[in-house]
Amino acid sequence: MRLIRLKDVKHATGLGRSTIYKYIEEGIFPKSVSLGDRAVAWVESEVMDWIMSKIEARNLVERVAA
């Protein structure tokens, strides 16, 4: 299991910091893991699963629309 920092989460998702934290608050993005004082990270596989869910949702919409 690998932990990734905010910079890598932003790079992988294309989202900005405020959007990531907004999505966490709304319960639609994986929660971060505390690494200690003022340091957090995300479980890489959870972020990748979130990205895959977005791709799958897009593909489902495309199939329904076709």
Image (cartoon, rainbow, N blue to C red):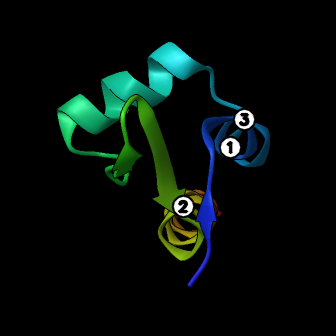
Q: How many numbered circles does the render carry?
A: 3
Location of residue 42 with respect to 1 vertically, above or below: above
- Judge from the rendering whether residue 66 lies leftward or rightward of residue 50; answer left or right: right
Q: Quadrant of residue 22?
A: top left
- Judge from the rendering whether residue 52 lies leftward or rightward of residue 37; answer left or right: right
Q: Position of residue 19 (x, y in %)?
A: 47, 21
Q: Nearer the viewer, residue 28 or 38?
A: 38
The residues bearing labels 1 and 3 have C-alpha atoms spaced at a distance of 10 Å
Q: Where's the N terminus, which quadrant?
A: bottom right
Between label 3 and label 2, give the one nearer the viewer.
3
Q: Which mark is residue 7?
A: 3
Tell me the amino acid under the disc marked 3: Lys
The residue identified by callout 1 is: 13
Element class at badge 1: helix
Crowd rating for badge 2 (residues with CA inside 10 Å; few <14, some 14–19, many 20+): many
Q: Residue at x 30, y 46 (%)?
A: 28
Tell me the amino acid under the disc marked 1: Thr
Q: Position of residue 63 (x, y in %)?
A: 60, 70
Q: Position of residue 32 (x, y in %)?
A: 37, 49
Q: Residue at x 45, y 43 (%)?
A: 40
